[in-house]
Image (cartoon, helix red, strand yellow):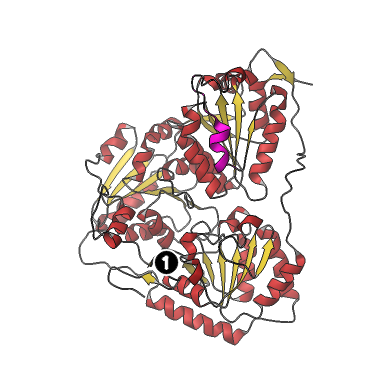
């Protein structure tokens, strides 16, 4: 049996787990591990410029591939810098393994240099965390970490490694476990057949149904099953922000995203539905608005792999705990074998009503004769230039909502954004993580002049590792969503929402060795964007001036029902 040091075990275990890239930043507590990395070539390390970027790169890799991403950060400030990225992954149920350095075991609790209680700090925002107590336990801990991160409801796992657990001169037998044995952790692998039968019978009696799906469909690899079931039944489908791409965005049965900034037709359909099939969604506050007014005439079937998510905010009439893919497969077989069929006349009448709602609004926005660009036009152009086939990452704010509304995602795992935590600074390193693993794909980061400055130092990482992402900065010279709320709720008192003294982004990007473009007129947009995406081997930053006064609509009226929306600055349902 091979003898390895603890540091070598960390690296070898990652290799044996199939990890190709890890994203990180070195420091004293991890130098033994970094030395072990140097002496092998199987696991490649990507040196970011800030630990938050490392976690976002790992997170985006996981969102795009379904496999756990890996970040490696040192103790103290290195570990605490990673917490925002860990919380981002936790809130969106993203599998990730974060290895944090720690001071030597005998110094823990003595306020040693660069010591933080990473187990305590991370506990509220991880699925599980480990502290290495013996070097020989490292292979089993790494194996368990990946198993926990990727199975059941996915999430981030932290492994805290004291420096003396990685001493190069101390060697131990190494064997990577082929199987994981954890008596206290048994994720559910299938749904209750009786409940699935009851749900299917109810589906076939619906007259005004809606299929409402979230990130669980994408994380569970259930997009094909969702599409098949939806087409068999001819039911309308709406996605959450995290679920976009789970059902083809250009399909006639897709009625748009629902919720706070959801489409008029999706929110109206939800409110008036008599049956809602919720799959891999958790009825969060950005979807439901006031829960006591939520979908008052609807029976609710709720499928989720996490029993804690069912009936947490909205009571389910038929709860089904299980993986979305497996449950939908069983539903499909029951529908195929059933003597009942959906009420065709009722469903057709329901579609006529939805089409009326769609015709009334349908994602419209106002333009004028000036050459001043609307942010919606930029996203529509991005969809046109990339043929709707790009990986699109976003930061958080108005630009995120415009991207979700106007880019039509026909495939899962293509829309990469921070949904639950709403993390500014996520989009750019996320685009880097995707591009590194899909080098031939178009990868676009949609951002704003506020968000991009959160992690703009990663332009240096992109230069070092040749990551030619395209950055579309929708520059309205303000924190747009904050300003919109101030317009709507604070009589336009714009307290600290205007961004003054912005840099010349073109010069800044060029200083890092990349290509910068400034676009100020709509008539120049298509040509500039096509030129940007034609530069396959260069990072291009497009500084795009957009209407600073544009709002995101529809927007739900706070504490209202799903149907209560602002449709423009002057029009309300």
Q: Residue furthest left?
A: 370
Give residue 159's position: percent from left, percent from top.
Answer: 61, 32
Please state if 279 lies on the left or on the right of 49 as rendered.
Answer: right
Quadrant containing the C terminus in the rendered view: bottom left
Front-most of 11 and 180?
A: 180
User: Residues in magenta?
Assistant: 113-126
Q: Residue furthest right?
A: 1
Give residue 103's position: percent from left, percent from top.
Answer: 56, 21
Q: Is residue 238 visible?
A: yes
Residue 116, magenta (yes or no): yes
Figure label count: 1
Q: Residue at x 67, y 42 (%)?
A: 148
Give residue 428's position: percent from left, percent from top.
Answer: 42, 42
Q: Residues within 10 Å of mark 1 (few under 14, many from 20)?
A: few
- Above or below, 244 relative to 229: above
Give residue 160's position: percent from left, percent from top.
Answer: 60, 29
Q: Residue furthest top?
A: 169
Front-most of 427 and 423?
A: 423
Q: Which residue is mark 1?
A: 559
Q: Residue at x 23, y 67 (%)?
A: 368
């Amino acid at each position: 049996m091979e003898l390895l040091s603890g540091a070598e075990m960390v690296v070898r275990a990652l290799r044996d787990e199939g990890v190709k890239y890890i994203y990180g930043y070195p420091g004293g507590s991890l130098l033994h591990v970094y030395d072990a990395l140097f002496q092998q070539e199987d696991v490649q390390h990507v040196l970011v410029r800030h630990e938050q970027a490392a976690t976002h790169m790992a997170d985006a890799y996981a969102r795009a591939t379904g496999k756990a991403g890996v970040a490696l950060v040192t103790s103290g400030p290195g570990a605490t810098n990673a917490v925002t990225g860990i919380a981002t992954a936790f809130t969106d149920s993203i599998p990730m393994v974060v290895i944090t350095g720690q001071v030597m075991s005998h110094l823990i609790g003595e306020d040693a240099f660069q010591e933080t209680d990473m187990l305590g700090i991370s506990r509220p925002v991880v699925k599980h965390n480990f502290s290495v107590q013996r070097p020989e336990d490292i292979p089993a801990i790494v194996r368990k970490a990946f198993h926990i991160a990727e199975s059941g409801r996915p999430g981030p796992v932290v492994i805290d490694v004291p420096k003396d657990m990685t001493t190069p001169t101390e060697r131990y037998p190494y064997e990577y476990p082929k199987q994981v044995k954890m008596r206290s952790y048994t994720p559910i692998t299938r749904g209750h057949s009786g409940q699935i039968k009851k749900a299917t019978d109810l589906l076939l009696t619906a007259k005004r149904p809606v299929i409402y799906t979230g990130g669980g469909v994408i994380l569970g690899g259930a997009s094909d099953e969702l599409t098949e079931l939806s087409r068999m039944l001819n039911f309308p489908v709406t996605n959450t922000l995290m679920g976009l791409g789970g059902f083809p965005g250009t399909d006639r049965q897709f009625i748009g995203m629902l919720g706070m900034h959801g489409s008029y037709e999706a929110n109206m359909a939800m409110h008036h539905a008599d049956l809602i099939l919720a799959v891999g969604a958790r009825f969060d506050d950005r979807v439901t608005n006031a829960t006591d007014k939520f979908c008052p005439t609807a029976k609710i079937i709720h499928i989720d792999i996490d029993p804690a998510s069912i009936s947490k905010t909205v009571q389910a009439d038929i709860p089904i705990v299980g993986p979305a893919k497996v449950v939908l497969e069983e539903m499909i077989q029951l529908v195929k074998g059933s003597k009942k069929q959906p009420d065709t006349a009722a469903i057709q009448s329901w579609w006529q009503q939805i089409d009326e709602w769609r015709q009334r609004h349908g994602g419209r926005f106002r333009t004028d004769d000036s050459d001043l660009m609307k942010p919606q036009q930029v996203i529509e152009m991005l969809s046109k230039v990339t043929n709707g086939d790009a990986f699109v990452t976003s930061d958080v704010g108005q630009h995120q909502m415009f991207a979700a509304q106007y880019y039509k995602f026909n495939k899962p795992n293509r829309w990469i954004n921070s949904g639950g935590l709403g993390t500014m600074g996520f989009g750019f390193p996320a685009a880097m993580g995707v591009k590194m693993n899909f080098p031939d794909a178009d990868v676009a980061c949609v951002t704003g002049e506020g968000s991009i400055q959160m992690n703009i130092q990663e332009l240096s990482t992109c230069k070092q590792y040749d990551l030619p992402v395209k950055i579309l900065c929708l520059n309205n010279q303000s924190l747009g969503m904050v300003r919109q709320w101030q317009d709507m709720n604070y009589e336009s008192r714009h307290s600290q929402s205007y961004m003054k003294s912005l840099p010349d982004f073109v010069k800044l990007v060029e200083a890092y060795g990349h290509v910068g473009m400034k676009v100020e007129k709509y008539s120049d947009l298509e040509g500039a964007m096509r030129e940007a995406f034609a530069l396959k081997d260069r990072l291009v930053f497009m500084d795009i001036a957009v209407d600073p006064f544009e709002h995101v609509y529809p927007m739900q009226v706070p504490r209202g029902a799903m149907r209560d929306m602002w449709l423009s600055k002057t029009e309300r349902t």
